[in-house]
Amino acid sequence: MAGHSQFKNIMHRKGAQDAKRSKIFSKLSREITMAAKLGGPDVASNARLRLAISTARAQSMPKDNIERAIQKASGGDAENYDELRYEGYGPGGVGIIVEALTDNRNRTASDVRTIFSKAGGNMGESGSVSFMFDRVGEIGFKADVADADTMFEAALEAGAVEVESDEDGHAVYTEPADLHAVAAALTEALKTEPETAKLIFKAKEPTTLDKEGAEKLMKLLDALEDNDDVQTVFGGYHIPEDVMAALEG
């Protein structure tokens, strides 16, 4: 399991747990409201909103929830959220980038720092970790949407730069500026919307973890994901299949 494939790890695991569903919906609503507030409520002209709604639908978020999140921005009563990014190191020296939407910078910074510390990691300065990652677009599709060859050909035609396919799904990577265009082209070609389509941080050289390191890191990532202000977490790690099987067993 690679740390950059967000749709295949944390959100995927969390989405399978009904107890976490309301928290996921809350984070998705915040992103939709933020996108609508910044770019307007017109989905056709607001790419960020369009992709936020697509992600919400993939997580089975009710239509009423989506509409309320948009109306909240349109009505002018939405909270003012700041988009923040934190960088740090987890167990084993794994680089971690945390993206947050918050209405209280001090609270969120304190919470994130505490989470890192309790899990055996430490939060660093801006730029201390980001150089270990590439900023790319990632579009995630379920495995049954197409076979690997079909997905590769469709992605290449759409303008993608890389495709990774396995039993968990397909991850299509793009240049940052091409994300929205490639997502739209693939939606048309495959006749289905992606599970996720967003800008991510992809590790250049992921750190391979053993069972002990993976257990510690998972606790840190889970704690970060459970924080209400944290939207996305990226980690520069790789967990071999045998280690993952041992963890799940």
Image (cartoon, helix red, strand yellow):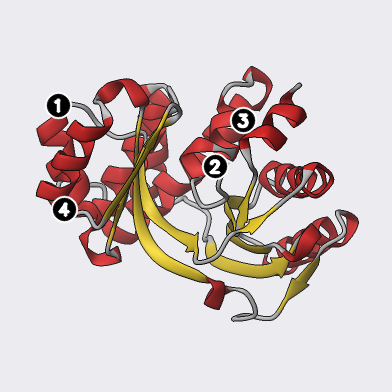
What residue would you read off at disc 2?
27
Q: Are marks 2 and 1 in contact (CB under 8 Å)?
A: no
Q: CA distance from mark 4 to mark 1?
A: 15 Å
Q: Quick one: quadrant of the N terminus? A: top right
Callout 2: helix, strand or loop? helix
**Are discs 3 and 1 less than 8 Å apart at CB?**
no
Element at badge 4?
A: helix
Please tell me whether mark 3 or mark 2 is closer to you in this view. 3
Marked residue nearer the N-terminal end (4 or 2): 2
Mark 4 or mark 1: whose residue is earlier in sequence: 4
Badge 4 vs badge 3, beta-carbon distance below 8 Å: no
CA separation in Å, label 3 and label 1: 27 Å
For the residues marked 2 and 1, what is the alpha-carbon distance in whole angstroms? 27 Å
Up-down relation of residue 99 to residue 71 (above or below): below
The amino acid sitting under disc 1 is Lys
Residue 50: % across, % down: 26, 44
Q: Judge depth for marks 4 and 2 and give the one in front.
A: 4
Residue 246, quarter of the rendered image: top right
10 Å crowding of disc 2: few (<14), some (14-19), many (20+): many
Residue at image mark 4: 181
Whether residue 25 appears in this view of the structure is yes
